[in-house]
Image (cartoon, helix red, strand yellow):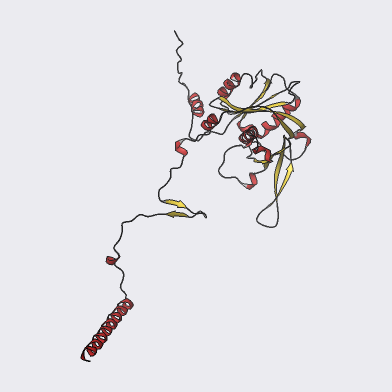
Amino acid sequence: MGVIQRVVKPSTQRGKRALADKAPKIIENDKKTLFIHGKKTSPIGRDFLKSIYAFKRTNSIYYGRKNSILPFEEGEKLERLSKTKDTSLFALTSHSKKRPNNVIFGRLFNHQILDMVELGISDWRALETFCKSKVGSGTKPCVLFHGVGFTQSPEYVRLKSLLLDFFRGPQVTNVSPAGFELAIQFTMFEGKIFMRCYKILLKKSGVDVPRVELEEIGPSLTFSLRRSKLASDDLLKTACRKPRALMSRPVKNISKNALGTKLGRVHMQRQDYKDLQVRKTAVIKKAKKEQIQRRKTEKNLANAAKAANLIK
């Protein structure tokens, strides 16, 4: 006899709010990130996770203890942990003789691993080595990608999408220039990815538009691709599908031109212009009388000429 799975309803208001927060929504909450230490780590990997966690502290969970999790070999433990903490992104650091200073970026869909990429860290410079002003946590960053390599291989195309999903920050509709103070740059050259972080400084320029300067604040490092596990195109399409409530329905007979002007088409029955009533002003009446008089004069002259020809 099989075990009956019972659905336990929450008995407190706090439990109800927690379940409502985890329930599917038309517009989902901001994605949470899970930072994990592997079974064996290095100081560079730990410092890297702490530096990235400083940018994403508001929607992140950091596990400082070591965990025996191997996402590429067996990801069930990571999926269970993600379901418990309701997270959609994860970053795991590990270290071994074969893969030193290792970090794994990944994302999940429906609490199952969608795709993940393993990268190696080199040329590491921590935040403390720059000794300059920092930015606040939870800041909306400007993520930049340079290099044609991000479009040449399917792995690097998916890596670009994963990095953008990981570092894009909270979803907002409007951004104030004063609060737009973090720029994260990824440059690809000869198979390596260079990551640099800058603080955006707005200074006086004498005009309405301020002068923009960039100040490197760290961290600074170089990535090298090692392993990847990518989702199929069908699964990725399912994960990126929009609900019907968010899809804009097409409106008939309304269109926009190249300049963005809205144009509308109105359908009417065919009109008889003979019965069309227009306003008859004094000028129109006078012109019409003159036209009738002129036609009568021309007709009389024509009849007189015709009668003269018949007498002859």
Nearer to us in this view, 200 or 42:
42
**Residue at left offset 74%, top offset 33%:** 222
Q: How many marks?
A: 0
Residue situated furthest top in the rendering: 1
Residue situated furthest bottom in the rendering: 312
Counting from the top left corner in percent of width and height, residue 120 is at: 72, 28
Counting from the top left corner in percent of width and height, residue 43 is at: 75, 25
Residue 276 to residue 34: above or below: below
Nearer to us in this view, 150 or 169:
150
Residue 185 to residue 106: above or below: below
In the displayed structure image, the side of residue 35 where residue 291 appears, left or right: left
Counting from the top left corner in percent of width and height, residue 236 is at: 55, 31
Report which quarter residue 199 is drawn in.
Answer: top right
- Of the 4 image quadrants, the one containing the C terminus is bottom left
Report which quarter residue 169 is drawn in.
Answer: top right
Nearer to us in this view, 256 or 34:
256
- Of the 4 image quadrants, the one containing the N terminus is top left
In the displayed structure image, the side of residue 298 where residue 51 appears, left or right: right
Counting from the top left corner in percent of width and height, residue 207 is at: 67, 57
Residue situated furthest left in the rendering: 311
In the displayed structure image, the side of residue 95 where residue 271 appears, left or right: left
